[in-house]
Each structure stands twice: as structure tokens, then as C-alpha cells.
Amino acid sequence: MILIPAIDLKEGQCVRLRQGRMGDATVFSNDPVATAEHWLAEGCRRLHIVDLDGAFAGHPKNAELISTMVTALGEVPVQVGGGIRSTDIAAAYFDAGVANVIIGTQAIREPAFLAKLAQRYPQQVTLGIDARGGRVAVSGWDEEAAVDAMDLARSTADLPLASIVYTDIDRDGMLQGLNVSSTRALAEVAGAPVIASGGVTNLNDLKQLQSVFADAPHLLLGAITGRAIYEGELDFSAGQKLLDELNAPRSTG
């Protein structure tokens, strides 16, 4: 299990939203490339980038900036979401060095698109399940679909997905802790490891998450953290160190 720093892009800036509301954004940096390099220096093993403008527009708005960030990170894998609604857009991100593209809205509007993309790029496509009250939200969380999060995870279990990013919108950016029970329940019906998102606040949250998955670590790839590491509630390096210690093989001697 790894800790994954998030960089959300809005008008070329690094921001964090509360519960996905574009009107409730806090700017943390005017230099997203420098921010990416900071997390690299802190020892991140994967970076999560969301093009918020793209999520609402329906097509990428920060693709050039993201490409520069990917280059700056070198060998560290980057996963990108926001406005990826065609094969051409996904291919362009892969050509730029992105490790995984996150498909959310289009997976709901056109399930066949997700299936075809995953089959064309096995283990390179991540399904984004953003839920509010158990229902999936789309279009930058601006609309709620008549789709249950568990049903979506279950229906895609046979696809060669890299992972599933599961976000509890009600907790995102609120520093209230993860919804670990729902995360575990979804992971049990999914066909790919889950990345928990929404609410990571402190080391205790990470301990609780690891504990809930202690008997099935293969179901959990990591946890995304955003506001907590930008506001100083969570020290990123300390968080990853803790997870490494918790996940270390126990001596039986």
C-alpha cells in the first residue's frame, strides 16, 4: 500500500476543492510543476493528477501542463483523470508518458468505451468511481447518475483494469477521515485493486485503512491524499514510512 499525493489543476493552479465544488477552491500553488517536484523529493511513488477544468468541460484543458509535470517526475508513474472521454485523448496522454488514465464520466455514459479502452490498453486504465450517498457522480461531480457504486464495480470486474479509484465525495476535502467500510465493501466485489480517496487526514486514518485490509492486502493499492498534506495535517513522508512499517513482513522466529 502506498500513499499517493494529489494535484488538482484549475486554471493552471494547484487547488483543492471541498466536496468537489468548483466554487469552493483553495489555491495551494501557482506552480504545479514545482509542486510535483516537491512530492517527488518527499519520496512519492505515484502521483495523482486531476484536470478539474477538463472534467467540467468534457475535454482536457491542462494537457500541456500535465505533460510537463510527467516529464519532471521521470520514472515515477502518474495517473491522470478529468475530461478523458475518447480513445484519442487517452492515447495522447499515454504518448506523453502518463502511466494510467482515469475514466469516470464516460464509463457511465458509454460503458462500451471503458471496455474497449481497457482491452486496448490492459493494466493502463483506471476506473474512477466517485460516489455521493452510494450513487455515482459524473461531470466533475456536478451530476448524479442513477448508478450504484457497488454495481458499477461489480459490472467491470472482468475488465483488465489497472485499479479503481474510489472517492467518497461527502468526505473529499473535508478532513473527516476515510469511509473505510464502503471502501472495503467495494474492493471485495471489484476485479482490480482499489485506491482509497476522500478524507485522508492523519496517520490514524492510514492505520485504520491498513487494518481493515490487513487480511486482504491485495485488494488495496493505496490511498490518495490532498488537502491534509497541503495544510500540514499529514506529513507525507511520515505517512509513507508508517505504511511501509505496517506492511513489512512480520518475523515468525
Image (spheres, rainbow, N blue to C red):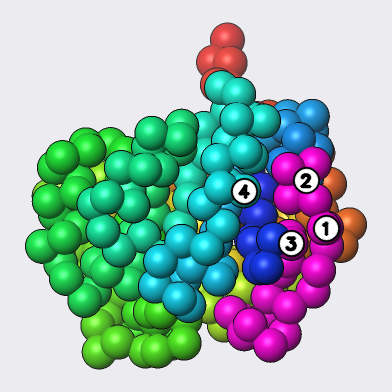
Q: Earlier in the sequence, mark 4 or mark 1?
A: 1
The residue tagged 3 is 13
Q: Which mark is residue 65?
A: 4
What is the CA distance from the residue labelled 4 to the residue labelled 3? 10 Å
Q: Earlier in the sequence, mark 2 or mark 4?
A: 2
What is the CA distance from the residue labelled 3 to the residue labelled 2? 10 Å
Circle 4/circle 3 CB separation < 8 Å? no
What is the CA distance from the residue labelled 4 to the residue labelled 1? 14 Å
Residue 126: percent from the left, percent from the top? 35, 50
The residue tagged 1 is 29
Of badges 2 and 4, the one in the foreground is: 4
Q: Main secondary structure of the magenta part?
A: strand
Q: Callout 2: helix, strand or loop?
A: helix
Residue 173 against residue 153 in the figure, above or below:
below
Residue 111 against residue 157 in the figure, above or below:
below
What is the CA distance from the residue labelled 2 to the residue labelled 4? 12 Å
Q: Callout 1: helix, strand or loop?
A: strand
Residue 157: percent from the left, percent from the top? 17, 54
Of badges 3 and 2, the one in the foreground is: 3
Q: In the image shown, does 105 or 56 lie closer to the viewer?
A: 56
Q: Is residue 15 magenta?
A: yes
Q: Earlier in the sequence, mark 3 or mark 1?
A: 3
Q: Earlier in the sequence, mark 3 or mark 2?
A: 3
Tag 3: residue type? Gln
Circle 2/circle 1 CB separation < 8 Å? yes
Q: Which residues are magenta?
A: 13-34
Q: Residue at x 57, y 52 (%)?
A: 49
Q: Earlier in the sequence, mark 2 or mark 1?
A: 1
Q: Callout 4: helix, strand or loop?
A: helix
Tag 2: residue type? Thr
